[in-house]
Amino acid sequence: MDHVIFHIDEKEKSPLLLGNVKNLLADMTAEVEVLANGVAVIGYKSEEFINQMNSLKDQGVQFVACRNALNAHHILKEELFAFVSVIPAGVVELVEKQSSGYAYIKP
Protein backbone atom coordinates (compact mmCIF):
# COMPACT_ATOMS: atom_id res chain seq x y z
CA MET A 1 0.00 0.00 0.00
CA ASP A 2 1.19 3.49 -0.82
CA HIS A 3 1.60 6.10 1.90
CA VAL A 4 0.90 9.78 1.28
CA ILE A 5 1.12 12.86 3.47
CA PHE A 6 -0.75 15.96 2.33
CA HIS A 7 0.52 19.20 3.84
CA ILE A 8 -1.52 22.38 4.15
CA ASP A 9 -0.52 25.66 5.75
CA GLU A 10 -2.97 28.01 3.98
CA LYS A 11 -6.64 27.72 4.98
CA GLU A 12 -7.84 29.02 1.59
CA LYS A 13 -6.33 25.94 -0.07
CA SER A 14 -8.48 23.55 2.01
CA PRO A 15 -11.04 22.89 -0.77
CA LEU A 16 -8.23 22.12 -3.23
CA LEU A 17 -6.48 19.80 -0.77
CA LEU A 18 -9.66 17.94 0.17
CA GLY A 19 -10.47 17.49 -3.53
CA ASN A 20 -6.95 16.18 -4.17
CA VAL A 21 -7.32 13.60 -1.38
CA LYS A 22 -10.73 12.51 -2.71
CA ASN A 23 -9.34 12.15 -6.24
CA LEU A 24 -6.33 10.17 -5.04
CA LEU A 25 -8.49 7.71 -3.12
CA ALA A 26 -10.82 7.30 -6.10
CA ASP A 27 -7.95 5.96 -8.20
CA MET A 28 -5.68 4.16 -5.75
CA THR A 29 -5.50 2.56 -2.35
CA ALA A 30 -3.29 4.55 -0.02
CA GLU A 31 -2.72 5.32 3.62
CA VAL A 32 -3.31 9.07 3.77
CA GLU A 33 -2.52 11.64 6.42
CA VAL A 34 -3.47 15.31 6.14
CA LEU A 35 -1.19 17.55 8.19
CA ALA A 36 -2.27 21.12 8.90
CA ASN A 37 0.07 23.71 10.33
CA GLY A 38 0.25 27.48 10.19
CA VAL A 39 -3.06 29.25 9.74
CA ALA A 40 -4.55 26.13 8.07
CA VAL A 41 -5.25 24.59 11.49
CA ILE A 42 -8.29 26.89 11.63
CA GLY A 43 -9.86 24.65 8.98
CA TYR A 44 -9.97 21.80 11.48
CA LYS A 45 -12.75 23.55 13.39
CA SER A 46 -14.56 25.11 10.43
CA GLU A 47 -18.04 23.79 9.70
CA GLU A 48 -17.37 24.73 6.09
CA PHE A 49 -15.23 21.59 5.65
CA ILE A 50 -16.83 19.10 8.05
CA ASN A 51 -18.80 17.09 5.47
CA GLN A 52 -15.81 16.53 3.19
CA MET A 53 -13.53 15.76 6.11
CA ASN A 54 -16.02 13.29 7.61
CA SER A 55 -16.33 11.50 4.29
CA LEU A 56 -12.53 11.21 3.98
CA LYS A 57 -12.18 10.17 7.63
CA ASP A 58 -14.64 7.36 6.92
CA GLN A 59 -12.28 6.24 4.13
CA GLY A 60 -9.41 6.01 6.62
CA VAL A 61 -7.80 9.43 6.14
CA GLN A 62 -6.06 10.68 9.26
CA PHE A 63 -6.19 14.40 10.03
CA VAL A 64 -3.44 15.83 12.24
CA ALA A 65 -2.77 19.34 13.51
CA CYS A 66 0.48 20.93 14.63
CA ARG A 67 0.36 21.84 18.33
CA ASN A 68 2.73 24.76 17.73
CA ALA A 69 0.31 26.21 15.17
CA LEU A 70 -2.68 25.65 17.46
CA ASN A 71 -0.87 27.51 20.23
CA ALA A 72 0.11 30.34 17.87
CA HIS A 73 -3.55 30.77 16.84
CA HIS A 74 -4.92 30.31 20.38
CA ILE A 75 -6.90 27.19 19.44
CA LEU A 76 -7.55 24.47 21.99
CA LYS A 77 -7.63 20.77 21.06
CA GLU A 78 -11.23 20.70 22.32
CA GLU A 79 -12.23 23.21 19.62
CA LEU A 80 -11.15 20.86 16.82
CA PHE A 81 -13.24 18.12 15.28
CA ALA A 82 -13.03 15.03 17.52
CA PHE A 83 -11.26 12.95 14.85
CA VAL A 84 -8.30 15.37 14.54
CA SER A 85 -5.11 14.26 16.27
CA VAL A 86 -2.61 16.78 17.60
CA ILE A 87 1.11 16.25 17.05
CA PRO A 88 3.88 18.29 18.70
CA ALA A 89 5.42 19.85 15.58
CA GLY A 90 4.31 19.75 11.96
CA VAL A 91 7.82 20.06 10.54
CA VAL A 92 9.00 17.08 12.57
CA GLU A 93 6.01 15.04 11.38
CA LEU A 94 6.85 15.89 7.75
CA VAL A 95 10.47 14.83 8.16
CA GLU A 96 9.52 11.58 9.88
CA LYS A 97 6.85 10.64 7.34
CA GLN A 98 9.05 11.45 4.34
CA SER A 99 11.95 9.55 5.90
CA SER A 100 9.70 6.50 6.27
CA GLY A 101 8.67 6.56 2.60
CA TYR A 102 5.54 8.72 2.51
CA ALA A 103 4.96 10.66 -0.70
CA TYR A 104 4.66 14.39 0.03
CA ILE A 105 1.94 16.49 -1.61
CA LYS A 106 1.35 20.19 -0.97
CA PRO A 107 -1.36 21.74 -3.14
Image (spheres, rainbow, N blue to C red):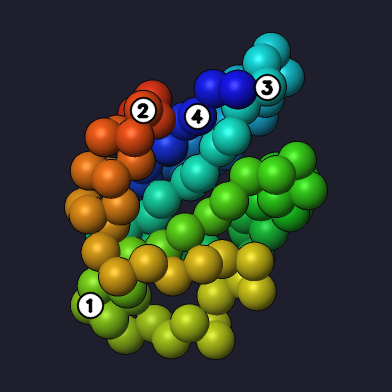
- Callout 4 amino acid: His
Which residue is tagged 2?
101
Q: Which residue is mark 1?
A: 72
Q: Position of residue 42 (x, y in %)?
A: 43, 66
Q: Residue 43's spot in the image, x, y percent? A: 48, 60
Q: Is residue 35 above or below residue 83?
A: above
Which badge, 2 or 3, is on the more N-terminal residue?
Answer: 3
Residue type beneath disc 2 = Gly
Q: Nearer the viewer, residue 63 or 72?
A: 63
Split into 4 quadrants, where in the image is the N terminus?
top right
Quadrant containing the C terminus is top left
| Amino acid on which the number 1 mark rests in the picture | Ala
Mark 1–mark 2 distance (CA, rounded to whole Å): 30 Å
Residue 106 visible in the current orientation: no
Q: Are marks 2 and 3 in contact (CB under 8 Å)?
A: no
Crowding near the residue tagged with mark 1, few <14, some 14–19, many ≥20 C-alpha atoms within 10 Å = few
Q: Hey, what amino acid is under mark 3?
A: Thr
